[in-house]
Amino acid sequence: MRSLQDLMHGQSADMAFQRGGDVSRDDYLVMAAGKSGSLASTACVLGAILAQATPEAVGALGCFGRHLGVAFQCVDDMLGIWGDAALTGKPVGADLLARRRTLPVLAALEAGGKPARQVERLYGDGGLGPVWLQELMEAIENAGGRVGR
């Protein structure tokens, strides 16, 4: 039951992030732990229980699963901007078009300076076309929102 509640709270927070406002990386991580972390944690816990693991192992695997779910969410958000739609099955830029405050966007906004102001301006200007999307993707990358590259 707790997993379902965490999932619902995480999904609700993710949807609320689309409305803008102040969203921090910590807010994002709490959302990801609920939305994706609760699913992965539950899968790990159930597997451990079915394998008759010790209570300590069940707890450790639950914690591992939560962290795995957060990592999955972070990578999924990166792929939503710079992934290959043919490989991911997810249209590139859909999160940006929906104005979702994903981790790359939050990292870019928190970086400060001219690139971050450009991301903020583009996010708020109502643009939608492919030129706007490409400009926003480049601004996020220039502001430091693309990690691991």
Image (tube, rainbow, N blue to C red):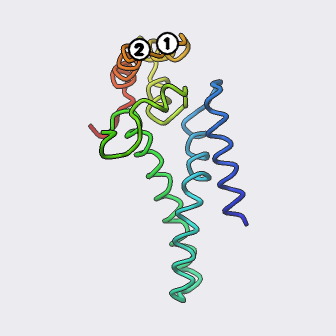
Examine the image and state in which quarter residue 29 appears: top right
- Mark toward the start of the polypeptide (1 vs 2): 1
Q: Residue at x 53, y 10 (%)?
A: 125
Spot the residue most to the bottom: 52
Residue nearest the observer in this picture, 142 or 93: 93
For mark 1, give the secondary structure.
Answer: loop
Examine the image and state in which quarter residue 146 appears: top left
Residue 64: % across, % down:
49, 65
Residue 43: % across, % down:
54, 70
Q: Which residue is under mark 1?
A: 127
Q: Would residue 146 appear left or right of 60 to someone viewing this image?
A: left
Q: Residue at x 61, y 45 (%)?
A: 31
Examine the image and state in which quarter residue 25 appears: top right
- In whole angstroms, how far apart are the C-alphas of marks 1 and 2? 6 Å
Residue 138: % across, % down:
34, 20
Question: In the figure, 59 relative to 22: above or below?
Answer: below
Q: Would residue 31 appear left or right of 87 to someone viewing this image?
A: right
Residue nearest the observer in this picture, 116 or 123: 123
Q: Which mark is residue 132?
A: 2
Contact between labelled residues 2 and 1, with CB atoms less than 8 Å apart: yes
Residue type at the position of mark 2: Trp
